[in-house]
């Protein structure tokens, strides 16, 4: 039977095997495993690629967001506005500062934070907004930045799914005070383990984050502030440097595949993605009435799917009892949680695999 995975990390590795193997061997040969040349070079190369003056490598996007929040001086008692329709890490990092995540609903077409809902959620305790560029498309940043300016709030972009996405000609991560990226293996730029980065245009913010990421120090034995061990691993940096050179072509492939899905799925009773700004399709998310039925039909024919996300953050057990954490509060988010289905998308997905997925869906809806 045909079998199509949700992502195919092995296929990508095989396509760049000799370069990756050489990069890993080089780290082993020098045995420089912590910080060092590869991390420094990756930071420079990723900053240049993202269009930001500074990049700080770190251990994940969860730690990237935590670092960015610390850079914004978020403290216990503060409130940070974000969405419930996202991965838990966005809100976890807020809690790591002792602050409270305040959720707002999303736009029913782009699935991103609804700027109209933000103002009503602002209180005297609000310090920052974290828009998430979900699935690979930027949130509507212009009104968000205007609100932030008006109310004196910092803006942290969660770019975990949006490497290379654009908004009015500006790159994801360069519009707010900080942009936070994930290099989790399945992300558009994936390491072979956990890794992340923060980008910023502000030199003193960059310096503070550099201290925080590595035990509050610049020199080996002097600790200026209390920091963390949130460093990027040198092996991951070496791997990411090889992969960064391919990222533009991988993004182009994702966009090609998404366009082709749009054509192949035309006329079916599903909602395909609506592209308002340059989308990098980390996920290809459709909506349909009987999501479980469609997923089961695909699975029966060997096709893996995902759901991003079936349980909104405000309904997660960990937020039970928190203000706003009851069902019915965010109708768009709750409706999406019941209807979204992510189809396989990765740069190596072939046209015949895609044809097969579309045929199975067409038969299911017949
Ligand atoms: C993956 C993801 C994260 C967390 O990234 P890690 O590198 O796994 O910590 C945060 N936010 C969003 C939207 C994500 O998709």
Image: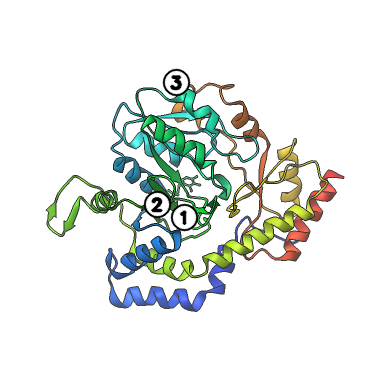
Mark 1 lies on a secondary structure that is loop
Asked whether the beta carbons under mark 3 and mark 1 sit within 8 Å of each other, the answer is no
299 in relation to 106, above or below: below
Q: Nearer the viewer, residue 109 or 170?
A: 170
Is 261 on the left or on the right of 235, as rendered?
Answer: right
40 in relation to 72, above or below: below
What residue is disc 1 on?
Answer: 184
Residue 284: horizontal and vertical position, in percent? 65, 50
Categorize mark 3 by other alpha carbons within 10 Å: few (<14), some (14-19), many (20+).
few
Q: Which mark is residue 232?
A: none
Q: Which mark is residue 60?
A: 2
Q: What residue lies at 23% left-to-right and 52% top-to-bottom?
A: 211
Label whose residue precedes the other's in the sequence (3 or 2): 2
Q: What residue lies at 55% left-to-right and 44% top-to-bottom?
A: 134
Question: Can I make out residue 192 in this image?
Answer: no
Label whose residue precedes the other's in the sequence (3 or 1): 1
């Amino acid at each position: 039977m045909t079998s199509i995975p949700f992502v195919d990390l092995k296929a990508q590795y095989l396509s760049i095997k000799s370069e990756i193997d050489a990069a890993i061997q080089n780290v082993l040969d020098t045995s420089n495993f912590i910080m060092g040349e590869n991390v420094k070079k990756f930071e420079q190369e990723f900053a240049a690629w993202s269009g930001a003056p500074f990049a700080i490598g770190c251990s994940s996007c969860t730690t990237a967001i935590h670092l960015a929040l610390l850079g914004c001086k978020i403290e216990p008692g503060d409130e940070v506005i974000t969405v419930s329709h996202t991965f838990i890490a966005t809100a976890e990092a807020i809690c790591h500062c002792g602050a409270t995540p305040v959720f707002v609903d999303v736009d029913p077409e782009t699935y991103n934070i609804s700027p109209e809902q933000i103002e009503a959620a602002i209180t005297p305790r609000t310090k920052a907004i974290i828009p998430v560029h979900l699935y690979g498309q930027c949130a509507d940043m212009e009104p968000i930045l205007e609100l932030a300016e008006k109310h004196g709030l910092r803006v942290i972009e969660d770019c975990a799914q949006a490497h290379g996405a654009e908004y009015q000609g500006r790159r994801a991560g360069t519009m707010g005070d900080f942009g936070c990226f994930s290099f989790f293996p399945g992300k558009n730029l994936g390491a072979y383990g956990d890794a992340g980065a923060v980008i910023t245009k502000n030199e003193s913010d960059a310096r503070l984050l550099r201290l925080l990421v590595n035990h509050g120090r610049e020199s080996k034995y002097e600790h200026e502030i209390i920091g963390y061990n949130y460093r990027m691993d040198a092996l991951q940096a070496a791997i990411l440097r090889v992969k960064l050179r391919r990222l533009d072509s991988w993004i182009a492939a994702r966009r090609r595949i998404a366009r082709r899905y749009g054509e192949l799925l035309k006329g079916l009773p599903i909602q395909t993605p609506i592209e308002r700004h340059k989308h990098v399709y980390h996920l290809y998310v459709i909506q349909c009435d009987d999501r479980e039925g469609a997923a089961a039909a695909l699975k029966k024919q060997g096709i893996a799917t995902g759901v991003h996300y079936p349980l909104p953050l405000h309904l997660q057990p960990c937020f039970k009892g928190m203000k706003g954490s009851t069902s019915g509060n965010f109708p768009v988010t709750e409706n999406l949680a019941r209807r979204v289905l992510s189809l396989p998308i990765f740069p190596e997905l072939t046209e015949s695999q895609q044809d097969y997925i579309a045929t199975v869906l067409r038969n299911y809806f017949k």
